[in-house]
Image: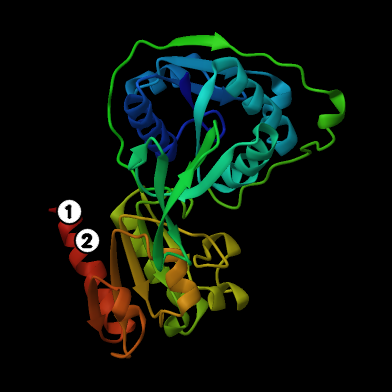
Amino acid sequence: MSVLVYTENWDGKFKKATYEIVSYANEIAKQLGCDLIALSIGKVSDEELKSLENYGASKVLNANDDKYNTIISQVYTKIIADAVNATNASVVVFANTYTGRSIAPRVSVKLNAGLVSGCIALPTSTQPFVVNKKAYSGKAFADVQVNSDIKILTLNQNSYKIVENKKDAAIEAFTTEIPDNYFKVKSIEISKASDKITVNDAEILVSGGRGLKASEHFGMLDEIASILGPTATTACSRPITDLDWRPHSEHVGQTGKVVAPNLYFAIGISGAIQHLAGINSSKIIVAINTDKDAPIFEAADYGIIGDAFEVLPSLIEELTKLKNS
């Protein structure tokens, strides 16, 4: 018996979310008294694969083929399901990313395995197997019991800390037969909108709403994010992308990106329920709004009742002093 964790990579590199799920899966392996095996798909260097041993992986299966560099759900499902069978895995862990949410249900069907998506904590029990997740857009919590022989979990980003647990992991090639007709989708070109860190990966989000009144005023948010460093970036509410003031890649909320940064600035955002559903996993929320009755203040840890055009210049000045001190 083992625990298998699918370690998603981005252009051949692992990110913070990968090390979070490896740490999480390793703790489950400890609960079950078995080994943690990591599975990587696509072109990833041995050095990068070896980094997984720092967080508890005792073995790394490397499915490395140029055909796998483009994510095709049907192909990845077959590889992961075959790896589960090959390793006799009783628990399979994914990150709750777009890729994880696309592939985990397919693997669940293929293996007749119970699926719990959006987990936020370790299993509270392994006999029976019970794990906690958010429900109703984060307004409630559910303890889900999984009775199938194989359990599949997707972990919400920023829900579990990265824990070092050094092992000496062997890297093994993993091959399986994939029918040619699975490769119907071909990637012709990949264009990136920006080299900035994505809103899902950012630890600090500086987000703006209609209270900023015009697209050119978002330059202040860009400046704040720049001062706060490489783990910070800008975001916005849905009306802003609807107005084409900011790209859709920055839209956070129930109908956009669901995020969980360590720090979330909500500037000129009233706090509609759809927006709050996408940010309520943030560790700290700071709201700036002229309306003292705005719903955002009910969710905020810190609130400033004031005009953003007066508050932000002072905030930029103080952050700059702090950075240069």
What is the three-letter code of the residue carrying label 1? Asn
**Does dot 2 land on a helix, a strand or a loop?**
helix
Tell me which residue sits at (68%, 19%) in the image: 65
In terms of depth relative to the viewer, which is nearer, 2 or 321? 2
Query: Crowding at label 1, few (<14), some or many (≥20) Cα neighbours within 10 Å?
Result: few
Q: Are marks 2 and 1 in contact (CB under 8 Å)?
A: yes
Could you tell whether 99 is left or right of 250 in the image? right
What is the three-letter code of the residue carrying label 2? Thr
Residue 98 location in percent, x, y?
Answer: 58, 48
Could you tell whether 239 is left or right of 262 in the image? right
Judge whether 27 appears above or below 243 on screen: above
**Does dot 1 land on a helix, a strand or a loop?**
helix
Residue 282 location in percent, x, y?
Answer: 34, 60
Is residue 6 visible from the viewing direction of this image?
Answer: no
Could you tell whether 75 is left or right of 13 in the image? right
Tell me which residue sits at (55%, 74%) in the image: 238
Tell me which residue sits at (61%, 20%) in the image: 85
Residue under label 2:
320
Judge whether 105 appears above or below 319 on screen: above
Is residue 319 visible from the viewing direction of this image?
Answer: yes
Residue under label 1:
324
Q: How is the image coloured?
A: rainbow
Quarter of the image for residue 206 reads bottom left
Query: Crowding at label 2, few (<14), some or many (≥20) Cα neighbours within 10 Å?
Result: some
Residue 33 location in percent, x, y?
Answer: 34, 21
Judge whether 238 appears above or below 230 on screen: below
